[in-house]
């Protein structure tokens, strides 16, 4: 990752100074927003295909079971290789990806037995793997503190402080050996503690040690006064690199395999018949979900990352029927939610409403004793804002929104009522029963409607010039007769004459 960060920094140095880059990245809001946007892009692109495949909750399972891969990789690295891993270590990421694939494989094996349904198979697989992870944590790495809040909601607010330092100028490292003039060599008693004697006793044994020997980084050498020129450093947050690489990988995967993903998502059998490998794409998709889940582990936690996989695609699904449009709209919703989520965590709703003022008003009006200072989890606030945009799409979507659905159903009911009345009049006019069936003052009794409803329907039909009321008789106008005939031709099957 250091090489990737160096390339990015060198590119940015063409447009900004070191001070400007450091000032920008040391702002917690800037770093948190960038990380949140990268996670939103990755989760939304993958979540779109999970949603269309009916596998959205697979992201929930994988976000839990990646803990098993992290724990196994941690044990192997610390116990066998003696390394000191962190959440951005590539080995931990590889282990998490393996755990995600194991979740999918185990689910498929259980489902293909034919004894349980696929949702039940998923519910059997991921608790098993998650339980194994918990046992391994308690048995082998119980000396490692894992904060529950960090696991659930992450630590995106302090991601700016977890950095790698990159030297741009005056990058001189200093190595001090015991033979150097500046080496601080002293003597240490090797048996005083074991024998309980003083270093001044005759039996004391000593060895020479150097207290300042070793290799100093440019920054350490400058702080120790070993170099004259201060190194020029850029401090780059680790999480930005991890999440940006994940977003780039996911974007490239979707762009390069868009045709294959689209076909295998909507018709896997046809994709297989045409020579594609939907199974390989399926597991590749699961590997990427695992990578994104572990990449977001220390930023938004293993629980809230589920929201980035599910909510933006669900909102986009309400706004469009086109796959390419979903792949554009869902990341936009996720990134906008991440941007405004940081402000929400500080009490600013869309930069329009101050939540502190609302809490104060509630206390004054209702005599409540709420804490008036709003300060909440950043990642949880991001999810809350994404959920807010989903609610907007759910309510106001032009085609599938709650309001448009209510309007469409009301118009359908109105059209149905109109057509029923027109059909009744068409079937009975010019017949012997016309006086009984088409009397305006009693027409509502034939439909078991209220007089007011019948009055509204007749008023509407008269306004459209489809019926006339003459001498208390409801009759179709020429336009009304043509309307009914067109309706019958479009919707009713004409019976063939009997010969």
Image: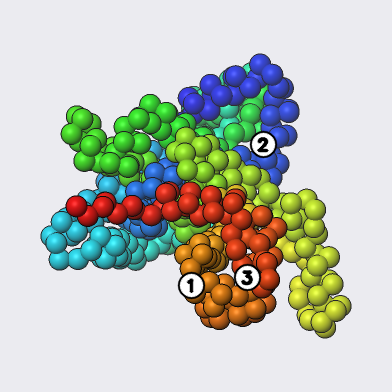
213 up-or-down from 85: above or below: above
Residue shown at 53%/28% (left/top)? 5
Front-most of residues 433 and 72? 433
Residue 232 visible, this angle: yes
Number of the front mark, 2 or 3: 3
Residue at 28% x, 41% y is 267
- On the question of residue 299 being in view, the answer is no
Which numbered marker is on residue 432?
Answer: 1
**Residue 377 x/y as whole percent:** 63, 59
Nearer-N-terminus badge (1/3): 1
Residue 223 horizontal/vertical position (percent): 66, 33
Find residue 236 and report its horizontal and vertical position in percent: 59, 34
> How far is disc 1 from disc 3 in space, using C-alphas?
13 Å
Crowd class of label 1 (few under 14; some 14 to 19; many from 20; radius 10 Å)? few
Q: Nearer the viewer, residue 435 or 459?
A: 435
- Rendered residue at 47%/35% (across/down): 324
Residue projecting furthest to the right: 364
Q: Residues within 10 Å of mark 2 (few under 14, many from 20)?
A: many
List the single residue furthest toward the bottom: 367
Residue 199's place in the image compared with 215, above or below, is below
Q: Nearer the viewer, mark 1 or mark 2?
A: 1
| Residue 210: image location, x then y, percent | 50, 36
Q: Are dots 1 and 3 in contact, CB under 8 Å? A: no
**Label drawn at residue 473:** 3
Tell me which numbered mark, 2 or 3, is placed earlier along the sequence. Answer: 2
Q: Secondary structure under badge 3?
A: strand
Disc 2/disc 3 C-alpha distance (Å): 80 Å
- Against 344, is 332 above or below? above
**Label 3 Cα neighbours within 10 Å, binned few <14 / some 14-19 / many ≥20:** some
Q: How many marks?
A: 3
What is the C-alpha distance between the residues marked 1 and 2? 88 Å
Mark carried by residue 25: 2
């Amino acid at each position: 990752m250091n090489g990737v960060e160096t390339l990015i920094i060198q590119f940015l140095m063409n447009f900004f100074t070191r001070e400007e880059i450091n000032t920008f990245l040391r702002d917690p809001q800037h770093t948190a927003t960038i990380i949140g946007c990268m996670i939103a892009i990755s989760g939304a692109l993958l979540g779109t295909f999970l949603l269309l495949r009916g596998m959205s909750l697979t992201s929930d399972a994988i976000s839990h079971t990646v803990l098993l891969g992290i724990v196994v990789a941690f044990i192997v690295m610390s116990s066998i290789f003696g390394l000191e891993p962190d959440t951005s270590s590539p080995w931990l990421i590889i282990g998490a990806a393996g755990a995600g694939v194991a979740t999918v494989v185990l689910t498929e094996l259980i489902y293909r037995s034919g004894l349980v349904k696929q949702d039940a198979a998923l519910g059997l697989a991921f608790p098993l793997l998650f339980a194994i992870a918990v046992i391994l944590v308690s048995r082998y790495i119980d000396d490692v503190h894992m904060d529950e809040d960090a696991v659930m909601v992450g630590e995106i607010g302090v991601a700016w402080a977890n950095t790698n330092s990159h030297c741009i100028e005056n990058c001189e490292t200093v190595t001090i050996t015991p033979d150097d003039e500046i080496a601080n060599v002293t003597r240490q008693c090797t048996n005083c503690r074991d024998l309980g004697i003083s270093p001044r006793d005759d039996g004391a044994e000593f060895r020479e040690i150097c207290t300042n020997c070793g290799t100093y980084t440019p920054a350490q050498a400058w702080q120790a006064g070993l170099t004259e020129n201060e190194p020029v450093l850029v401090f780059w947050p680790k999480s930005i690199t991890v999440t940006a690489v994940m977003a780039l990988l996911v974007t490239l995967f979707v762009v390069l395999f868009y045709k294959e993903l689209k076909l295998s998502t909507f018709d896997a059998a046809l994709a297989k018949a045409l020579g594609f490998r939907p199974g390989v794409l399926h597991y590749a998709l699961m590997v990427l979900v695992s990578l994104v889940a572990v990449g977001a582990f220390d930023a938004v936690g293993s629980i809230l990352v589920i929201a980035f996989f599910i909510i933006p695609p669900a909102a986009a699904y309400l706004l469009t029927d086109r796959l390419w449009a979903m792949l554009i709209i869902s990341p936009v919703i996720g990134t906008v939610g991440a941007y405004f989520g940081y402000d929400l965590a500080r009490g600013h709703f869309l930069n329009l409403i101050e939540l502190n003022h609302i809490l104060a008003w509630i206390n004054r009006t209702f005599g409540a004793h709420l804490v008036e200072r709003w300060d909440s989890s950043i990642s949880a606030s991001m999810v809350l804002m994404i959920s807010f945009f989903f609610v907007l799409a759910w309510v106001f979507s032009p085609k599938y929104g709650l309001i448009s659905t209510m309007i469409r159903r009301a118009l359908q009911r109105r059209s149905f009522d109109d057509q029923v009345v027109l059909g009744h009049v068409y079937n009975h006019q010019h017949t012997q029963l016309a006086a009984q069936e088409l009397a305006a003052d009693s027409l509502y009794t034939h439909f078991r409607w209220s007089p007011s409803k019948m009055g509204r329907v007749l008023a509407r039909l008269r306004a459209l010039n489809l019926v006339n009321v003459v001498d208390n008789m409801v009759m179709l106008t020429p336009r009304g007769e043509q309307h009914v005939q067109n309706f019958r031709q479009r919707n009713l099957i004409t019976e063939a004459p009997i010969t």
